[in-house]
Amino acid sequence: MSNVKSGSKAIDQQIAKQTAKKIAKNMLLEIMFVRWWARVAMILISGFAAIMGVLAPFFQKEFIDRLSGASALSTFSPELQAALPQEAPPFLAFAFICLVLNLGCLQFVNYLGAREAIYIQRLWAQRLYERILELRTDSLADRQLGEIVAIYATDLPGATILLEQSLPQMFSILFPLILAPFLIVMLFHTPIATTLEIISGIILMNLMLAFRQSRFFYTFKKLAADRLGLVNEWVQNIRTLRILGWVRAFERRIIHIREVETKNRIAMLNNGQTMNAVASSITFVLNLTLISSLVYNSLTPVTPGALLALLWVVAVFLTRPFRQMPWLFTFLFDGTSSLNRAAALFAVTNQDGVSREEEFKKLKDMSAQDPAMEVKNLNLQIGGQSILKDVSFTIAEGEFIAVVGEVGSGKSMLLLSLLAETGATFGSYQIGANDARTMNVDQLRQFFTFVPQEGFIMSATLRENVAFEYDVHGNVDSNVLQSLARSQFVFEQERIKDGLDTEIGERGVNLSGGQKQRVSLARVDYYQAPILLLDDCLSAVDVDTEKKIMKSLLLGDWKHRTRILATHRLTILEKTDRVFFLKNGILEAQGKYSHLLKTNAEFREYTASVAREEASTKRENPEDSSVPIEAVANVGMNLQTGEE
């Protein structure tokens, strides 16, 4: 069985790689052809800049030679000789104009590349954002948040460097390397083989150095993403790490990655300096070679203008291409690696290979009425492991359901599956008269509000956290205060100084666990969705507060709303309409609490074990009022016999 699973996983990985390659190819085509007219403009302007660049030394040569009376225009046609001025000064003006046009065109090409890169970045960032929203929780389980942030912040700009830097550099290098050898041969009659051999050797050397530099760049980005993920995890869990005494160990791990990252960066800088040194010295070698070739092999006398023009072509006109060449190759390699990393994230799909939009193709007008629920044959597999198996149930409108079971029995995943947040499949899923399988996600979720166990708290004011909206106006205050009061969040008792304007730190750092849960409950009360999914939302409140919340909300203002509560609190079960008992992902039993105690031995064993655990916790922590020993004793009384 394990061999079958591993084989299936290998096939899935191979399919994902093939998909990523196709996406990377399409992204590369977008770089080349989206807004193609801008690419054509870059090519034409770069070609024109190169022509202006080679005309400048030609006019300089003619200026010097005419001043010295050694003009070599006789090598050209008589028509060209007659068309050009006979005086020297105009040629200097022509050279200056050509240089200005050359530099201006190159700068404009760089501007076009940067502008088009920004356009592609926006296009891809929006697409990746929509992709991440489409993916379910289980599909991103093997990816750290820091990795996704790094792809947004580093790899998307890194991929578009192919357009911002590589494409303009390619054109500004390619045209001079094509035109310069022919200009040298045409003007100075040097052997073209010598020039081409030297340039080919330069290209090969730069290619090797650039490939090495790109490896450093790739390692740098990977290490930075790993460090960012660790730092993010460290910041989010700093309190827990401090309590457990793991802060130093976690910090040592971060420091170790930082040290490796620093060593890689030093090697990257050293290699970059070598690239720059080689590129700078190459023009000197090329100068000596070509001047020697010109002096010893030229068929015509060497004029001062010819020497100046040759020095200008090699030392000025070709300097930029030679210096840019290693970085062109580096950016090509680096941009390609970033493109592949981004494509790999684009290639992530929900584990059944179906997007949410494809899951809910059939759209129809929905109304938040008749929210009774019926589920048949709900199945969920994650990573080849069966989490929920053939779960079926019916819930009446306004019913209060408790979902219980051991840790890992599938309680939370059941709630998330009802929200279409997992890859669960349904034989049937009805909300009233509506087929939930035909809804898109937004339509489905209008029926629900959800309270996770830890509660989600924004770094914002208390008002904004309850209304769940930034910069919300004060005209909602009466409703917000009412919802907070129902959730037993009383300012005088909570040490909240500024009322609804109190700023809550990131992830609710200024609130206790119980306060976070009560703010989350107030948010649910504020939004009047018909079905409430509550994932152990009372685990952090004390027993007195729990009783008040049960009375004011779960059995009070919410009594006409359908409530599904995953819980470990036995004291709640007798107040519910029914209990769903999950074991290993299977709905073993359902019914009233008292009935299950009498008829189901496994349920009695489960409740007895929970009662013993709570009693043990109370004896070890007698000051903990959240676990009342008398309540545990009452709940656990006669569990083995099933008597109430």
Image (cartoon, grey):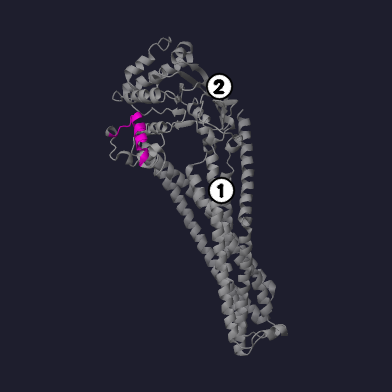
Is label 1 in a helix, a strand or a loop? helix
Q: Can residue 268 be seen in this view?
A: yes
Query: In terms of secondary structure, what is the magenta stretch mainly?
Result: helix
Looking at numbered disc 2 in the image, what kind of residue is underneath it?
Ser
Which span of residues is magenta-colored?
474-491
Q: Residue at x 35, y 14 (%)?
A: 634
Q: Quarter of the image holding residue 508?
A: top left
Residue 482 pos. (x, y %)? 35, 32
Give 5 or 100, whichever is nearer the viewer: 100
Is label 2 in a helix, a strand or a loop? strand
Q: Quarter of the image holding residue 52?
A: bottom right
> Looking at the image, is 26 positioned above or below residue 355?
below
Q: Can residue 330 be seen in this view?
A: no
Q: Which of marks 1 and 2 is nearer the N terminus?
A: 1
Looking at numbered disc 1 in the image, what kind of residue is underneath it?
Ala
Nearest to the eye among marks 1 and 2: give it: 2
In the picture of the structure, the residue carrying the numbered disc 2 is 392
Residue 529 belongs to magenta span: no
Q: In this view, does 508 lie to the left or right of 598?
A: left
Q: In which quarter of the image is the N terminus?
A: top right
